[in-house]
Image (tube, helix red, strand yellow):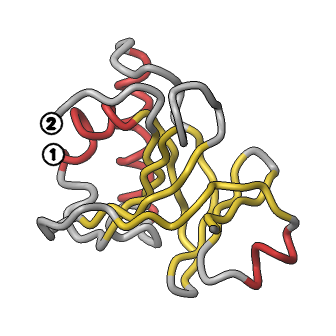
Amino acid sequence: MSKLINNHIIFSYDEPQNLRVAAQVNRYLDTLWAMDKLKYTPKLGVGSYKGDLEPIVMMDYNDFMAHVFPSGYVDNQESFLQLNPRSPRTTALQGSLMFNHQATKPILLGDFKEVSKSEAIQSEAWTYLDGKSFVCKK
């Protein structure tokens, strides 16, 4: 695994409808944060993937790969949304779909852009974080 600068991951976890599992994941992330092992506080939100609503977490890519990916909490997830800068000189992000159990390159989805709630809901996949709706589009 190589370290990536200003890259983020948006993911859901296995069995998000199970209250105990959700509590365990949140406690795990909170403990990592309290131990000062994370670059920034993970953000919680809601996302839609293939028409299914799910709780999501956004965090630093390197922190995800070091702590969450090997934790067992995301073993059955099909994919994760990787966000990275379009270029080193911009804060604009682009999104790629990174598959969990396939040795394939991430698929570029397009720019990660803020959109209205109605536009997000009409999209195939969307993210709701910090009171804002986002989609990846070209």
Location of residue 133 with respect to 40 vertically, above or below: below
Q: Residue at x 51, y 85 (%)?
A: 50
Please give the name of the residue rendered at 60% of the width and 66% of the height, measured from the top-left corner.
47
**Mark 1 packing: few (<14 Cα in 10 Å), some, or many (20+)?**
few
Which residue type does callout 2 highlight? Met
Task: Tell me the amino acid under the disc marked 1.
Answer: Pro
Disc 2, SS? loop
Say left or right for 23 vs 124: left
Residue at image position (42%, 51%) is: 82
Whole-percent x and y of residue 56? 52, 57
Q: Residue sitting at 65 percent across and 40 percent down?
A: 92
Q: Left of 101 or right of it: where is 26?
A: right
Coordinates of residue 26 in the picture (x, y in percent): 44, 43
Where the N terminus falls, by quadrant?
top left
Query: Can you say whether 130 is above or below 107 in the image?
Result: above
Quadrant of the rendering where the C terminus is positioned: bottom right
Residue 121, quarter of picture: bottom right
Image x and y of residue 112, in percent: 63, 55
Task: Point out the frontmost of discs 2 and 1.
Answer: 2
Q: Which residue is mark 1?
A: 70
Q: Secondary structure at mark 1?
A: helix
First reached walking from the N terminus: tag 2 or tag 1: 2
Front-most of residues 31 and 100: 100
Q: Is 28 above or below relative to 10?
A: above
